[in-house]
Image (cartoon, helix red, strand yellow):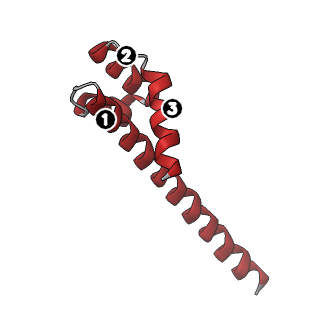
Amino acid sequence: MSFELNSAFERREEWKAARLSEVEYQEIARALKALASEHGASAEPAIDALAHKGLDAALGVIAATTGAAAEAEFHQFRARDRLR
C-alpha cells in the first residue's frame, strides 16, 4: 500500500514540475513578445531562438534587431507581468 502511495506522489510531483516549467516558458515568451513589440520589431525570430537555443539567444536576437538593452528590459517586463 505504501509503495502505491509513494508512486502516486512521485507522479504527481513530476506533473507539477512539468506544469511549472510550461508556465514559466509561457511567461518568458510573453515577455519577449512584449519587449519586441515595444521596439517595433517582430517577435518571431526571438521566439524561434528561445525554442531552439534558449533565453540568451532570444535576448541576443532582440538586442541585435533593436539595439536595446534587452536583458534589463526583459526582466522589467517579467516583473510587470508577474504583478498582474
Left or right: where does residue 78 sit relative to residue 45?
A: right
Hey, what amino acid is under mark 3? His
Q: Disc count in the image? A: 3
Give the secondary structure at mark 1: helix
Farthest-out residue, bottom: 1
Looking at marks 2 and 1 on the same chain, the residue that comes earlier in the sequence is marked by 1
Task: Give the residue pinned by disc 2.
Answer: 68
Q: Which mark is residue 37?
A: none
Quadrant of the rendering where the N terminus is positioned: bottom right
Q: Which mark is residue 75?
A: 3
x 68%, y 73%: residue: 9
Give the secondary structure at mark 3: helix
Location of residue 23 in the rendering, given as x and y in whole percent from the top left corner = 47, 54
Left or right: where does residue 62 sit relative to residue 80?
A: left
* Cα gap from disc 2 to disc 1, whole angstroms: 17 Å
Q: Quadrant of residue 41?
A: top left
Hey, what amino acid is under mark 2? Ala
Location of residue 30 in the rendering, given as x and y in whole percent from the top left corner = 37, 43
Left or right: where does residue 31 sit relative to residue 48?
A: right
Looking at marks 3 and 1 on the same chain, the residue that comes earlier in the sequence is marked by 1
Q: Quadrant of residue 64?
A: top left
Q: Which mark is residue 47?
A: 1
Left or right: where does residue 27 sit relative to residue 46?
A: right
